[in-house]
C-alpha cells in the first residue's frame, strides 16, 4: 500500500469558543492550542496510520514551524524526500476557531511556502508515483502542481484521488483525469452549480470523473460511479472537533483503494475512521490507527 500525497503542510493555531463569531464580533475563547495540520499533511498522516507507506510532496519554509512539521511527519514514518525547503518563505499556518454544540470550525490560511510548490517538485517524485497504489492531492497548493500530479498518475496508470478543497472552479481537463473526486456537499455545489448532492454527483460523472464520493458529515457519504448511486452511513458519535475529519476520510479512502478494496468498502472504512477522528482534538493528532478502525468495523 504505497501512496503519494501532493499537498500542503500547515501549523494549526486553534481556539475553542462557545459559538462561532459573526462578522465583526469578538467572542472569548479558551487557550491557544497548536497542532500539526494542512490538508496534504493531514491526509498523509491519516494514510500512514491506516497502514500505507506514504511519500509526501510539499514545500515548507526555513523556520521553526517548518522544522516542527518535518519532525512530526517523520515520526509517522512518512517519506519526506520531496518535502522541499523554500528559503526565505514562511511555512504554512492556519488560524482556526472551533465552536458551538456541533464543534464546527472557521479556518483561514496564511500565504506561505505551500503556494510555491512547483510542477517540477512533483515531477521529481515521479518514480514514487510510478510505484504507488494511489496518488492524492488537494487545492491548498498551486493548481499547476495538482495538474502535474494528475498527469503523472495517469501516465503510470495509478488512481488519482482529488479532494477539491479549498474549493475553486476547476478545468474539465483536470477533472477528466480524476479517478475519484472527494468533495463535501458545499464543495460539490460550488464545483457544479447543483445544490442537491445527487445532481452534483451526476454532473461530475458527466464531466469525466471516474467516481464521486461526496462526504455528508454525520449523514455519511454519497457514492456515485458507473454502477449507480448509493449512500453509506456514518457511525453516530459526540463530536469534539471536526477539523481534519474530511482529510481523515480522504486518507483512509485512498489507502483502501491502494489496498484493492471496492469503493463501497473503502468508503465505509473511511467513514468509520472519520467518525473516530471527530471525537478527538486536533487534525493530525486525531487520526485513528488501523487497529482502532478495524476494531470498530
Image (cartoon, rainbow, N blue to C red):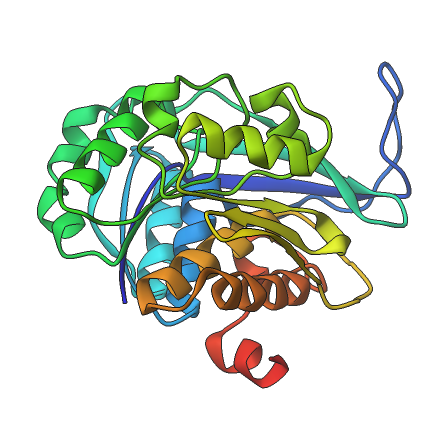
The quarter of the picture where residue 85 lies is: top left
Q: Is residue 247 above or below residue 123?
A: below
The quarter of the picture where residue 210 lies is: top left
Position of 222 with respect to 11 (left or right) is right
Position of 62 with respect to 274 (left or right) is left
Q: Image point 46% across, 58% down: which residue?
A: 253
Q: Is residue 186 above or below residue 286?
A: above
Question: Residue 154 or 96: which is nearer the viewer?
Answer: 154
Q: Image point 42% across, 58% down: which residue?
A: 45
The quarter of the picture where residue 189 lies is: top right
Give the quarter of the figure containing the N terminus. bottom left
Residue furthest to the bottom in view is 295
Q: Is residue 142 visible?
A: yes
User: x and y percent of residue 42 in the render?
Assistant: 47, 50
Q: Is residue 218 above or below residue 48?
A: above
Q: How many callouts does the rendering have?
A: 0
Give the quarter of the figure containing the C terminus. bottom right
Residue furthest to the front in view is 227
Q: Image point 68% across, 58% down: which residue?
A: 281
User: x and y percent of residue 103 in the render?
Assistant: 80, 48
Q: Is residue 107 visible?
A: no
Question: Residue 66 or 280: which is nearer the viewer?
Answer: 280
Amino acid at each position: 500500500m504505497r501512496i503519494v500525497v501532493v499537498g500542503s503542510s500547515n501549523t494549526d493555531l486553534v481556539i475553542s469558543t462557545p459559538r462561532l463569531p459573526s462578522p465583526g464580533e469578538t467572542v472569548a475563547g479558551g487557550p491557544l492550542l497548536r497542532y500539526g495540520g494542512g490538508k496534504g499533511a493531514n491526509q498523509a498522516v491519516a494514510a500512514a496510520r491506516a497502514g500505507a507507506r506514504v511519500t509526501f510532496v510539499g514545500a515548507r519554509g526555513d523556520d521553526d514551524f517548518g522544522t516542527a512539521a518535518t519532525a512530526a511527519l517523520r515520526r509517522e514514518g512518512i517519506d519526506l524526500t520531496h518535502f522541499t525547503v523554500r528559503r526565505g518563505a514562511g511555512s504554512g499556518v492556519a488560524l482556526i476557531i472551533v465552536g458551538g454544540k456541533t464543534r464546527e470550525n472557521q479556518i483561514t490560511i496564511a500565504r506561505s511556502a505551500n503556494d510555491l510548490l512547483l510542477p517540477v517538485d512533483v515531477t521529481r517524485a515521479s518514480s514514487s508515483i510510478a510505484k504507488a497504489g494511489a496518488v492524492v492531492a488537494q487545492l491548498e497548493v498551486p493548481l499547476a502542481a495538482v495538474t502535474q500530479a494528475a498527469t503523472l498518475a495517469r501516465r503510470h496508470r495509478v488512481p488519482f484521488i482529488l479532494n477539491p478543497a479549498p474549493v475553486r472552479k476547476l478545468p474539465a481537463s483536470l477533472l477528466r483525469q480524476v479517478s475519484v473526486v472527494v468533495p463535501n456537499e458545499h464543495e460539490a455545489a460550488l464545483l457544479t452549480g447543483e445544490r442537491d448532492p445527487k445532481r452534483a454527483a451526476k454532473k461530475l460523472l458527466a464531466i469525466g470523473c471516474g467516481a464521486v464520493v461526496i462526504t455528508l458529515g454525520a449523514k455519511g457519504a454519497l457514492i456515485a460511479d458507473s454502477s449507480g448511486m448509493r449512500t453509506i452511513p456514518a457511525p453516530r458519535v459526540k463530536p469534539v472537533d471536526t477539523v481534519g475529519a474530511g482529510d481523515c476520510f480522504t486518507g483512509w479512502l485512498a489507502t483502501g483503494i491502494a489496498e484493492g478494496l471496492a469503493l463501497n468498502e473503502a468508503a465505509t472504512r473511511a467513514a468509520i475512521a472519520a467518525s473516530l477522528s471527530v471525537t478527538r482534538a486536533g487534525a493530525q493528532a486525531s487520526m485513528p490507527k488501523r487497529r482502532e478502525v478495524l476494531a470498530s468495523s
